[in-house]
């Protein structure tokens, strides 16, 4: 490996640094964008059961805010339990935008690495070409300098593409993952709104009205 780095010359170091950053971002996003971490499937039933049993409490809100991104969305909606359906939905949408922004963390950097890596490889290729032309002289060229220039040009181009391809693949994958998680959380939040508003609406009916509605 060291021999390859030496053959590629100093232009390879920005590509190596970019690759290390890309690997770190990919690992962190794989860990952070898990379904069980972002939007646990069992959270909505548990919240609804707790709501039906004891209503909205400060302890319930604080636990949801610390639980997961989906929990923060639920907490924002439940804090407006006594407001209208529209206000409750607006609070959920605002919390959803913040959560989605957090899920997008580092993806811009990963996309930038995917776009710039081939350009950094091209820069290394140009440096190698300069070395090649510098090896030529009226009295003859230096074979060693010529070989070094060729290796710099080829290795940098290859490493730049090698870093760009997986970075772009994972960038696209994480973007699609965030979109899917955002849609799933939105659907669960809508179910929470419908349930809470339905429970509140039925609790405001009188005994006779409730009995009459049960026969419709």
Image: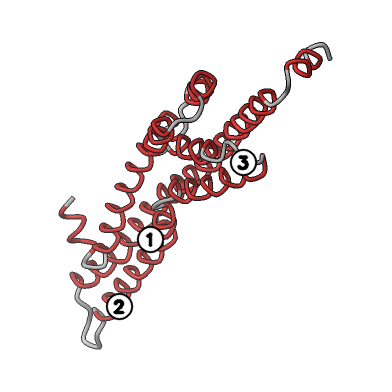
In front here: 137 or 148?
148
Specify the label residue 83 is tagged with: 3
Secondary structure of the residue carrying tag 2 is helix
Q: Residue 144: x and y, percent?
A: 18, 69
Task: Please name the residue shown 45% across and 30% down the image.
Answer: 57
Q: Residue furthest bottom?
A: 138
Q: Position of residue 128 (x, y in %)?
A: 29, 71
| Quadrant location, the C terminus | top right
The spot of residue 40 in percent (x, y) is 45, 27
Is residue 41 positioned above or below 128 on the image? Answer: above
Q: Which residue is mark 1?
A: 117
66 or 152, which lies in front? Answer: 66
Cβ atoms at labels 3 and 1 below 8 Å apart = no
What's the residue at 58%, 31% (across, down)? 188
Hey, which quadrant is residue 205 in on the image?
A: top right
Q: Are marks 2 and 3 in contact (CB under 8 Å)?
A: no
The residue lying furthest to the left in this view is 2
**In terms of secondary structure, where does tag 3 sit?**
loop
| Badge nearest the viewer, 1 or 2 | 1
Q: Nearer the viewer, residue 70 or 83?
A: 83
Q: Nearer the viewer, residue 190 or 115?
A: 190
The residue tagged 2 is 130
Q: Residues within 10 Å of mark 1 (few under 14, many from 20)?
A: many
Left-right relation of 67 to 210: left
Q: Residue 42: give its label.
A: none
**Disc 3 versus disc 1: nearer the observer:** 3
| Distance CA(mark 1)–CA(mark 2) | 20 Å
**Label 1's element?**
helix
Q: Earlier in the sequence, mark 3 or mark 1?
A: 3
């Amino acid at each position: 490996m060291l021999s390859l780095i030496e053959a590629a010359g100093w232009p390879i170091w920005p590509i190596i640094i970019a690759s290390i950053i890309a690997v770190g971002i990919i690992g962190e996003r794989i860990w952070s964008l898990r379904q069980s971490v972002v939007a646990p499937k069992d959270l909505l039933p548990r919240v609804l059961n707790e709501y039906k049993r004891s209503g909205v409490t400060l302890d319930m809100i604080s636990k949801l805010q610390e639980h997961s991104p989906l929990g923060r969305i639920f907490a924002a909606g439940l804090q407006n339990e006594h407001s209208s359906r529209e206000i409750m939905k607006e609070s959920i949408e605002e919390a959803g935008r913040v959560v989605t922004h957090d899920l997008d963390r580092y993806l811009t950097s990963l996309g930038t690495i995917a776009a710039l890596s081939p350009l950094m490889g091209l820069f290394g290729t140009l440096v190698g070409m300069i070395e090649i032309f510098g090896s030529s002289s009226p009295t003859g060229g230096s074979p060693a300098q010529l070989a070094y220039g060729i290796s710099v040009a080829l290795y940098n181009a290859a490493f730049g593409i090698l870093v760009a391809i997986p970075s772009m693949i994972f960038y696209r994958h994480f973007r699609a993952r965030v979109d899917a998680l955002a849609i799933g959380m939105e659907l669960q939040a809508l179910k929470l709104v419908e349930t809470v508003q339905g429970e509140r609406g039925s609790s405001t009916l009188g005994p006779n009205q409730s009995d009459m509605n049960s026969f419709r």
